[in-house]
Amino acid sequence: MTTLPDARTLVTELVGAQADAWDRSGQLPTPVPKELAAAGLLCAQVPGEYGGLGYTSTHNGELTAHVGALCSSLRSLMTSQGMAAWTVQRMGSAEQRAAHLPRLATGSLAGVAFSEPQAGSDLTAMTTQIRGAGDAVVVDGTKVWVTGAVYADLLVVFGRYDGGAAAVVVPAGAPGVEIRPVRDPLGCRAAGHATVDLRGVRVGTDSVLGGAGLPVDWLVTPALSYGRLSVAWGCVGIIRACLAAACRHARGRQQFGRALAEHQLVARLLAEMVVAEQSATRCCEHASCSWDAGSPELVAATVLAKHLAAGNAATAAAAAVQVLGSAGAHDGSTVARAYRDAKLMEIIEGSNEICQLLLAKHAEAVWS
Ligand code: FAD
């Protein structure tokens, strides 16, 4: 059993000072995600009975923040792997949990495919078809921006099925699966995003997870809740990395005869970053406590955590670039990478606007 302190040490040693080089090359060295996956750290909440580490959401969140502070691309793989595992855990039968969770907890890498060219924020518009064909199902469709697909051994694909929707586990190497990497993404450049074409892909009916036939938005909610909380903790990590870089620079560099940190307008940026870190951390802790307690507040708490943490990360990363000035204005700078990565966090797992709409609905239900 890898404890949280041991897990942090392993990640720190594996990533070292390589995140900027991975970002520039657009690739993670395959052994890095493989080693973390083999140690169960990419989906650390998988229960011990399935070979997982059985972390609480709070412990997994702190680990996610640690990974996010070092490398958002690697953290993105952690989010996808955890979403895949949670979907199997929530939707799978006992046999499906026993078949897939041990693989995910011990080394197989997974991507989760919801989005399509015409179904982004509105997943109810998805058109991917999962059709019964005797003792098999056949999957046809195109998924876009599937994080980690380039490294994946298996994909959890959502599509239309039998009047509703279903999630199906598809080997990434199955005949009919084509994975085309997204070229030059704005951020998380080494996260292996890809367009995935599925053309007549045949898998056994036992690959269709339970819950099949549910409305799309019901089916995707568990995976999205996991993903939102994971992204939120990753954003806490981004803010912490930015705070550390900005404070180091503001103390070390002098202008007008004084350290930058002694200029009050620079000090204000640092103070705002502290507020961003603390408020995002507290929101994530609340959401993780709701998760660990099985509280009905969970869904709203994860939306709130994701929305607040993503916005705070984008603002804090912009502030960090400002504090570093030209020293933070080039590829290879941690804060420049954070600035690009953080912007994407305002788009994925429910954009700012979609989170606001969900929070407004929640407010109407609770406050009217
Ligand atoms: P659109 O839905 O077209 O939205 C464009 C803009 O319009 C956004 O600002 C949005 O907020 C706004 N908008 C849309 N509807 C409304 C509304 N009703 N009211 C107000 N504003 C609205 N998908 C996967 O399936 N798996 C993955 O692993 C995955 N990883 C990703 C990783 C990255 C880095 C990125 C960029 C995307 C990823 N995606 C993934 C896709 C992601 O989920 C979508 O990009 C996201 O849902 C937004 O959809 P869209 O890009 O099509 O934007």
Image (spheres, rainbow, N blue to C red):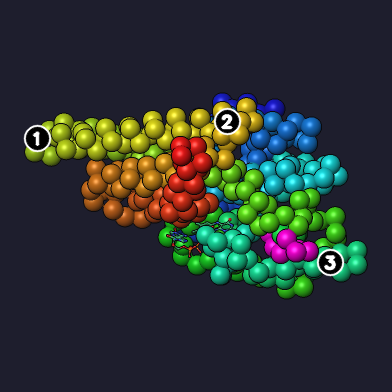
Q: Nearer the viewer, mark 3 or mark 1?
A: 3
- Between circles 2 and 1, the one closer to the viewer is 2
Measure the alpha-carbon separation of dots 3 and 1. 74 Å
Tag 2 residue: 290
Residue 132 is marked as 3
| Quarter where residue 261 is shown | top left
Few, some or many residues within 10 Å of mark 1 (<14, 14–19, 20+): few
Alpha carbons under labels 3 and 2: distance apart: 38 Å
Q: Position of residue 198 (x, y in %)?
A: 70, 70
As measured in the structure, the alpha-carbon distance from the residue carrying label 2 to the one carrying label 1 is 50 Å
* Residue in the image at 28% along x and 44% along y: 319
Looking at marks 2 and 1 on the same chain, the residue that comes earlier in the sequence is marked by 1
Q: Which residue is mark 1?
A: 257
42 and 216: which is toward the camera: 216
The x, y position of residue 28, in whole percent, is 55, 53
Mark 3–mark 2 CB contact (< 8 Å): no
Residue 306 drawn above or below residue 248: below
Residue at position x 68%, y 38% from top? 40
The magenta stretch is 155-164
Q: Give, as a three-letter code, the residue at label 2.
A: Ser
